[in-house]
Image: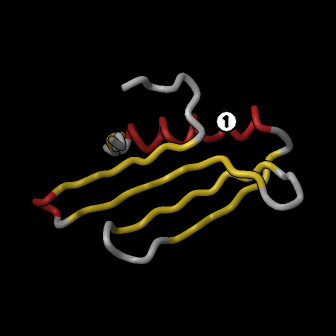
Amino acid sequence: MQLLLFPERVTLTRIRPALNERRYYQIEIQSDLFGTVVLARRWGRIGRTCRIRLESYPDFGSALDALASLARRKRLRGYMDQHSA
């Protein structure tokens, strides 16, 4: 499996059975119908309806910086990368 240097999608999970916690956080760069670059964030409890937040960015590079920053902060809070097969 090859890891991307600058991923456009990151899925993180934090599972702590002792605290009855099973959470996920997904960040993805998308473009809308008008060509605007959008950072989509989805989060919540695994198996439940998620919350969604969309933020527009002037270009792909700034959205990529925001994705990396968010992912770094979530990893500091105990979230781990979920790799798809």
Q: Residue at x 54, y 43 (%)?
A: 9
Residue 34 is left or right of residue 12, and the answer is: right
Q: Quadrant of the N terminus?
A: top left
Position of 50 relative to 18 (above/below): below
Q: Residue at x 39, y 47 (%)?
A: 12
Q: Residue at x 37, y 57 (%)?
A: 24
Q: Quadrant of the C terminus?
A: top left
Q: Amino acid at mark 1?
A: Leu
Circle 1 SS class: helix
Q: Residue furthest right?
A: 34
Q: Residue furthest left?
A: 18
Residue 83: x and y in percent read: 35, 40
Neighbor class of circle 1 (other Cα within 10 Å; few <14, some 14-19, many 20+) is many
**Quarter of image, res 16:** bottom left
Residue 33 is left or right of residue 46, and the answer is: right
Residue 54 is left or right of residue 41, and the answer is: right
Residue 21 is left or right of residue 33, and the answer is: left
Q: Residue at label 1?
A: 64
What is the image's colouring?
A: secondary structure
Residue 3: x and y in percent read: 44, 25
Residue 73: x and y in percent read: 47, 40
Position of 5 relative to 49 (above/below): above
Of 67 and 2, the residue lying toward us? 2
Position of 22 relative to 64 (above/below): below
**Quarter of image, res 23:** bottom left
Residue 51: x and y in percent read: 52, 71
